[in-house]
Image (cartoon, coloured by chain):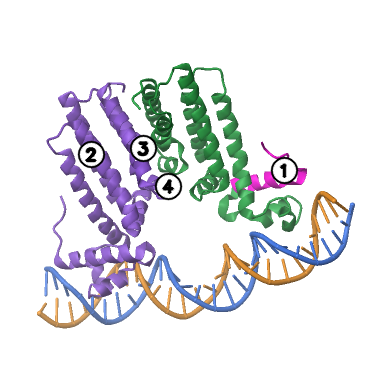
Chain colours: A purple, B green, C blue, D orange
Amino acid sequence: MSTPREPSEMRILSVAGEHLRQHGLRRFTVVAVAEEAGMTHANVYRYFPSRTALIDAVVDVWLKSAERKLADIADGPDPAEDKLERLILALAKANRDLLHEEPHLFAALSQAVAKRHAISRRNRTRVRALFERVIDDGIATGAFEPRDRDRAIAFVIDATHRFIHPASLELEADVPQESVDTRLATLIRVALRTLATGVI
Amino acid sequence: MSTPREPSEMRILSVAGEHLRQHGLRRFTVVAVAEEAGMTHANVYRYFPSRTALIDAVVDVWLKSAERKLADIADGPDPAEDKLERLILALAKANRDLLHEEPHLFAALSQAVAKRHAISRRNRTRVRALFERVIDDGIATGAFEPRDRDRAIAFVIDATHRFIHPASLELEADVPQESVDTRLATLIRVALRTLATGVI
DNA sequence: GCAGTTACATTTTACAAATTTTGTTATTTT
DNA sequence: AAAATAACAAAATTTGTAAAATGTAACTGC
């Protein structure tokens, strides 16, 4: 899955991560990263084809780490209903926490999503696959009985969009967490009930 | 409700509308609008306190026109279910059509919403009130039976957010209309069913 | 031949000066 | 008195240019 990285590459990636988190996209320069990594900037280009690719690599580390947590939930032994609920909650929480705790990194992710970079498209595909897996799981065990499986998947993703997509999360940055949590809980309850009762 | 406007004010507003639609926010200048309206820019300030206020006035004309259509639906004699469905569809369509047919005006609206200008906050309040009215109507006639009215209203707005909010619509600009329509139809069906069956 | 540098062309960014636009006030016009 | 302008300060934008950063290629040392 992920390519094993050489020590220099790891060092660059780690320094780049610090720089991005501390200084943000605007002030992030390959020259500064290279200097702090103890090399000239030209050498950075031996490992990363461009500044954008380096930034994307940093974001990708975070995305992959978030994905692993989601995969753990999706692959767990629990009932599909529980897993779907936890999947949605974990995804919403991961993104929302990033927004508040690492705003610069969040901004980089947000831009990668907005500009449809490969890392974000692939992440989207994989996360969607997790949703599909859990919903298929629920269908297999009889917990979910949608008439149209694909439509059911699209429904869950569309309905929770507001609490998951970076562009939507930014809009609610100042809304009290508690209120958001309540509303999301309502939405999840409806989604689960809908999947269970074959309305779709 | 809306202040009757003087002829000069109307002329400025109309020229400003053309300029905004044709040239976009960036190239929109009070000087150019004034020139085309046959006056000096200082005179524009007799009617509009600032460039931003003038732009907002243009956007507000569109918002008010959209609101009137929505109010017609909400105040109609039809069953609350039908009205709620048509309200959501009309709102989604109005915004989506604006995105495709008047991209510059859409961008101005988008910015007014993002920056929480008074016109957009008030529009949001009024549109929300229409939703409340229709849902209350449905509760009164027994068509809807939510356990918690406020939660039900929030649910409908959150669930349809993806198809209504400018920031979300921009993300899907290139998705085929047909696909979007299908997904929105699914969401509306679920929302109506949910309101009807007291899950919330 | 791999990890790195040096040297250099190209592209961005940063900054200062000039210009334009914004917004205000005093004045003119009707 | 209402509608408009002229004149002006403050703010924003544009323009041109120096500096810095990005990206490439040829070269060095291990």
Q: Which residue type carries mark 2?
A: Arg
Dot 4: chain letter: A
- In magenta, the rendered stretch is B1-21
- Could you tell me which secondary element the residue under label 3 belongs to? helix
Foreground disc of the pair 3, 4? 3
In the picture, the disc for residue A171 is: 4
User: Residue A91: image x %, image y %?
Assistant: 27, 44
Q: What residue type is labelled 3?
A: Arg
Distance (Cα) linking label 1 and label 4 = 33 Å
Q: Is mark 4 on a helix, strand or loop?
A: helix
Same subunit, labels 2 and 3: the answer reads yes
- Nearer to us of marks 1 and 3 is 3
Q: Mark 2, mark 1: which one is toward the viewer?
A: 2
Check the residue under mark 1 and report the chain it is in.
B
Residue A125 sits inside the magenta stretch: no
Q: Above or below — where is B140 with respect to B18?
A: above
